[in-house]
């Protein structure tokens, strides 16, 4: 939970050089060596990463869009973004 609080005010952004292809409501994200299909609620989160919104602001959008508790949305957004950061797709 500490990481969730710590990351809530961070502004995640997409890493330059990562290729992004929009496929209807989904994204294909990656580089020459790998690709990741980002779909459903993950695509909604990814589309919300504009380099200006904090993690908390993105979580509020998710809570509003999907009708879930804001605290749970924040935990889910942080978990997803940490995974993307570990893969070099986003940075904090």
Image (cartoon, helix red, strand yellow):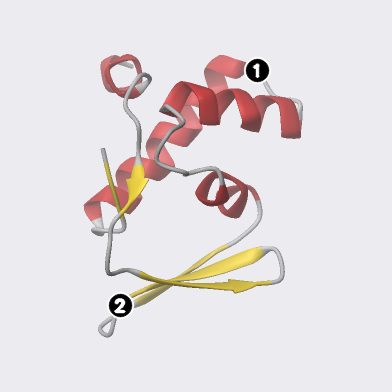
Whether residues under marks 1 and 2 lie with C-beta atoms below 8 angstroms apart, the answer is no
As displayed, is residue 59 above or below residue 21? Answer: above
If the image is split into quadrants, where does the N terminus sit? top left
The numbered mark at residue 69 is 1
Q: CA distance from mark 1 to mark 2?
A: 34 Å
Position of 73 compared to 83: left or right?
right
As displayed, is residue 92 above or below residue 26? Answer: above
Total numbered labels: 2
Question: Considering depth in this image, is 76 or 17 the residue closer to the camera?
Answer: 17
Give percent across and percent down for residue 69.
Answer: 65, 17
As displayed, is residue 26 above or below residue 82? Answer: below
Per the image, label 2 sits on a secondary structure element best described as loop
Number of the front mark, 1 or 2: 2
Give percent across and percent down for residue 24.
Answer: 71, 70
Give percent across and percent down for residue 54.
Answer: 42, 27
The numbered mark at residue 7 is none
Per the image, label 1 sits on a secondary structure element best described as loop
Q: Residue furthest bottom?
A: 32
Give percent across and percent down for residue 46.
Answer: 51, 50
As displayed, is residue 3 above or below residue 83? Answer: above
To which residue does mark 2 refer? 31
Position of 55 compared to 23: left or right?
left
Q: Quadrant of residue 9?
A: top left
Position of 61 compared to 19: left or right?
right
Q: Quadrant of residue 88?
A: bottom left
At 28% from the left and 61% from the top, the residue drawn is 16
At 52% from the left and 24% from the top, the residue drawn is 57
Q: Residues within 10 Å of mark 2 (few under 14, many from 20)?
A: some
Instruction: State which tag comes first along the sequence, 1 or 2.
Output: 2
């Amino acid at each position: 939970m500490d990481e969730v609080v710590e990351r809530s005010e961070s502004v995640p952004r997409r890493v330059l050089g990562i290729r992004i292809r929009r496929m209807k409501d989904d994204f294909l994200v990656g580089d020459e060596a790998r690709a990741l299909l980002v779909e459903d609620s993950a695509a909604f989160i990814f589309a919300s990463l504009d380099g200006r919104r904090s993690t908390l602001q993105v979580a509020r959008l998710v809570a509003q869009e999907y009708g879930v508790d804001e605290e749970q949305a924040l935990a889910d957004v942080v978990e997803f973004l940490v995974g993307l950061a570990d893969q070099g797709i986003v940075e904090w």
